[in-house]
Image (cartoon, helix red, strand yellow):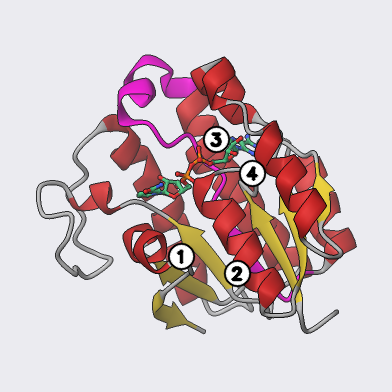
C-alpha cells in the first residue's frame, strides 16, 4: 500500500473537492469517487461535472472513479484496487429538506453508502484512518457545541439517518476485531479551515 494514497468520496462536491486539493498539495496521490448524484438530487444546477473536470485538469495524478457508493460490490472492488492509506468519506445527500421528501434515497446514500465504505475499509484498508464527514445537525438545537459522540439529539430526518453510519462506525471501532481506525471530523471545522480537522480518533 502506498503511504500517500488518498481516497475521497464525494470528490466533486463542495467539501470533497477541497479535500482533494488540500491533500494533492500535501503530496498525496488522490483518488476521487463521485457519480454526479448531486445532479439527480438537485437538477441541472446541482451538476458537479465541472468540478470533476477542474480536479482532473489541475491536480497531478488525480484519478476519478465513477462509482455509486450504494453499489456495495463496486465499492469493495475499488477499495481493494486502490488500497488507500487514508479515506475521507464526503459523499452524501446533504439537504435536510430533501431528506424528508426522498427518505429511501437519503437512507441508501447516507447510511448504506457509508456502511459500504466502512466495510470495504475493514476488508482492504484496515490500518488506514477513515474520516467521516458528518453534520452538526445530529446535535439538534445545540449544533455548535462540542458533544460526546454518545449524546446526539438529531434535528431532522436526515440528521437521524446520519446518526446510523456514525453509530455503526462507532460500534466497529470499539469492537475487539481489527476494524479500521475511525476518525471523527466536524465538517463545520473542515469548511472554515478548508481541511479536515480530526477531533477524536479510536484505534
Ligand atoms: N458544505 C457544508 O457547509 C457542510 C456543512 C455541514 C456538513 N456537511 C457535510 O459534508 C458532507 C459533504 O457535503 P458537501 O457540501 O460537500 O455536499 P455536496 O453535495 O457538495 O457533495 C457531495 C458529493 O457526493 C456525491 N454523491 C452523492 N451521492 C453519491 C453516491 N451515491 N455515489 C457517489 N457520489 C455521490 C455528489 O455527487 C456530490 O458531488 C455531507 O455529509 C454534508 O452533510 C457539509
**Mark 1 secondary-structure assignment:** loop
| Residue found at x 72% / y 42% | 52
* Crowd rating for badge 1 (residues with CA inside 10 Å; few <14, some 14–19, many 20+): some
Residue range corresponding to the magenta coloring: 84-104
Query: Is label 2 or label 3 in front?
Result: 2
| Residue found at x 64% / y 78% | 178
Give the number of the disc on residue 22.
Answer: 2
Residues at marks 2 and 3, CA–CA distance in whole angstroms: 25 Å
Question: Tags 4 and 1 in contact by the CB under 8 Å rule?
Answer: no
Question: Tags 4 and 3 in contact by the CB under 8 Å rule?
Answer: no
| Residue found at x 46% / y 51% | 165
Residues at marks 4 and 3, CA–CA distance in whole angstroms: 16 Å
Q: Is mark 4 within 8 Å of ligand 1?
A: yes
Residue under label 1:
194
- Sequence-earlier tag: 1 or 3: 3
Give the number of the disc on residue 170.
Answer: none
- Sequence-earlier tag: 2 or 3: 2
User: Can residue 39 be seen in the rendering of this structure?
Assistant: yes
Does the segment drawn in magenta span residue 11? no
Give the number of the disc on residue 109.
Answer: 3
Spot occupied by residue 105 in the image (x, y as percentages of width and height): 52, 24
- Sequence-earlier tag: 4 or 1: 4
Up-down relation of residue 65 to residue 25 (above or below): above
Up-down relation of residue 87 to residue 45 (above or below): below
Q: Is mark 3 within 8 Å of ligand 1?
A: yes
Residue under label 4:
12
Spot occupied by residue 40 in the image (x, y as percentages of width and height): 59, 19
Residues at marks 1 and 3, CA–CA distance in whole angstroms: 24 Å
Up-down relation of residue 124 to residue 46 (above or below): below
- Sequence-earlier tag: 4 or 2: 4
Does the segment drawn in magenta span residue 85? yes
- In the image shown, does 59 or 132 lie closer to the viewer? 59
Amino acid at each position: 500500500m502506498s503511504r500517500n494514497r488518498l481516497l475521497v468520496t464525494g470528490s466533486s462536491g463542495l467539501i470533497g473537492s477541497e479535500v482533494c486539493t488540500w491533500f494533492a498539495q500535501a503530496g498525496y496521490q488522490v483518488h476521487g469517487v463521485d457519480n454526479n448524484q448531486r445532479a439527480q438530487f438537485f437538477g441541472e444546477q446541482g451538476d458537479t461535472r465541472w468540478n470533476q473536470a477542474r480536479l482532473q485538469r489541475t491536480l497531478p495524478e488525480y484519478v476519478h472513479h465513477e462509482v455509486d457508493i450504494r453499489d456495495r460490490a463496486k465499492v469493495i472492488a475499488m477499495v481493494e484496487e486502490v488500497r488507500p492509506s487514508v479515506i475521507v468519506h464526503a459523499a452524501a445527500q446533504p439537504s435536510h429538506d430533501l431528506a424528508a421528501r426522498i427518505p429511501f434515497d437519503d437512507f441508501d446514500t447516507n447510511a448504506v453508502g457509508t456502511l459500504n465504505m466502512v466495510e470495504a475499509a475493514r476488508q482492504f484498508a484496515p490500518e488506514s484512518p477513515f474520516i467521516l464527514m458528518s453534520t452538526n445537525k445530529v446535535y439538534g438545537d445545540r449544533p455548535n457545541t462540542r458533544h460526546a459522540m454518545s449524546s446526539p439529539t438529531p434535528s431532522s430526518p436526515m440528521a437521524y439517518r446520519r446518526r446510523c453510519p456514525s453509530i455503526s462506525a462507532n460500534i466497529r471501532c470499539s469492537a475487539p476485531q481489527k476494524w479500521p481506525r475511525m476518525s471523527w471530523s466536524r465538517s463545520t471545522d473542515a469548511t472554515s479551515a478548508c481541511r479536515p480537522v480530526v477531533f477524536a480518533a479510536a484505534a
